[in-house]
Image: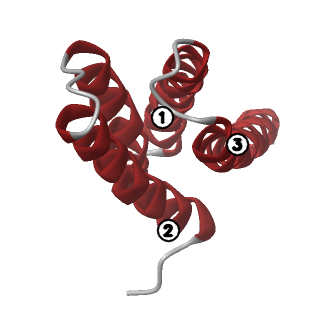
Amino acid sequence: MEKNLIQEKSYQFSIRIIKLYQYLKNEKKEYVLSKQILRCGTSIGANTEEAIGGSSQKDFVVKLNISYKEARETHYWLRLLKDTDYIDVVMFDSLIEDCESILKILYKIIETSRLNMNKTKIN
């Protein structure tokens, strides 16, 4: 099965988030924030997978909206981790760039899907 762009990007991002979690837990001995970033950061890909397997166009958009919200939350936690010196600027810049890329792709897919759903209703 061929993976699409958002499916692959969100999966690869989940791997990075898991490695970040391990770093925060093992190196920084940080257990609360690390769990938060783990949950929302990996949820992006999980909800994207659910969207792809959705039962309708509406279900697809609903699940991608959840992915988008989880990506927004991840963006927040990454900023917080940087501003509290749990991660350095280099690590932050790399992760936030990936997160923002995912946000842009999700937003575009959601907007395009909504437009297509509205066109279908009109016709």
Give residue 37's mark.
none
Q: Any mark on residue 8, and which? A: 2
Q: Nearer the viewer, residue 11 or 87?
A: 87
Are discs 1 and 3 less than 8 Å apart at CB?
no
Circle 3: element type: helix
Q: Secondary structure at mark 2?
A: helix
Please state the horizontal and vertical placement of residue 117, each as a whole percent of the image. 69, 39
Q: Residue at x 22, y 14 (%)?
A: 32
Of marks 1 and 3, which one's residue comes earlier in the chain? 1
Q: CA distance from mark 2 to mark 1?
A: 14 Å
According to the picture, the residue beneath numbered tag 3 turns out to be: 93
Vertical placement of residue 71 versus 99, above or below: above
The spot of residue 83 in percent (x, y) is: 61, 14
Residue 67's disc is: 1
- Residue in view at x 23 percent, y 45 percent: 22
Q: Residue at x 58, y 45 (%)?
A: 91
The three-letter code of the residue at mark 2 reads Glu
